[in-house]
Image: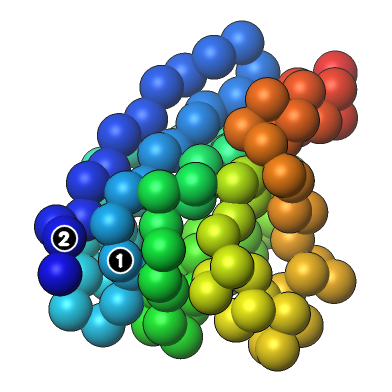
Amino acid sequence: MPALTLAHQRLSGVMVISVSGELDATNRAQLETYLRGIRPGHGARLVFDLSQVPFMDSSGLHVLLMCTTDCLKNGGTVHLAGVQPLPARLFEITGVLAHVPVHDTLEEAITTATERSI
């Protein structure tokens, strides 16, 4: 299994978090720790670039949903971008698509997140 790689960049009005590799029970703590370390802050607009995540299980989904809940409680938003087929199926089955905006491309997600922060 490929190692999970995480990176982020702060753009005007939005923070992009890039995730690469399979996201599951073996590395969910790595993502949780990373998110705590970057401290998005009150009103944060987050975009998760998932274009390099071929597989995600329910534990990875749980981390994303907890992050989303925290952001919403603090006046922010979370957008998902570039979701691959297997994670997309998980989002569909669990009803996540009704609660978290999913965009085909990173550019689309950034544009939408930025527009809503104005």
What residue do we see at 73% from left, 80% from top?
92
| Quadrant of residue 23 within the rendered picture | bottom left
Q: Is residue 11 left or right of residue 45?
A: left
Q: Secondary structure at mark 1?
A: loop
What residue do we see at 60% from left, 46% from top?
82
Q: Are marks 2 and 1 in contact (CB under 8 Å)?
A: yes
Whether residue 66 appears in this view of the structure is no
Q: CA distance from mark 2 to mark 1?
A: 7 Å
Q: Position of residue 102 (x, y in %)?
A: 73, 53
Q: Neighbour class for label 1 at 10 Å: few (<14), some, many (≥20)?
A: many
What kind of residue is marked 1? Glu
Q: Secondary structure at mark 2?
A: loop
Q: Residue furthest top?
A: 12
Foreground of the two, 83 or 10? 83
Q: Neighbour class for label 2 at 10 Å: few (<14), some, many (≥20)?
A: few
| Quadrant of residue 110 within the rendered picture | top right
What residue do we see at 41% from left, 63% from top?
54
Q: Position of residue 117 (x, y in %)?
A: 79, 25
Foreground of the two, 1 or 73? 1
Q: Which residue was labeled with disc 2?
A: 2
| Quadrant of residue 9 within the rendered picture | top left
Q: Position of residue 63 (x, y in %)?
A: 43, 70
Q: Is residue 44 left or right of residue 64?
A: right
Q: Which residue was labeled with disc 1?
A: 22
Please tell me whether residue 46 is drawn above or below residue 29 in the rendered image.
Answer: above
Instruction: Count every numbered label the image shows and give the total.
Output: 2
Foreground of the two, 77 or 105? 105
Whether residue 14 appears in this view of the structure is yes
Q: Is residue 9 left or right of residue 73?
A: left
Please tell me whether residue 63 is drawn above or below residue 42 in the rendered image.
Answer: below
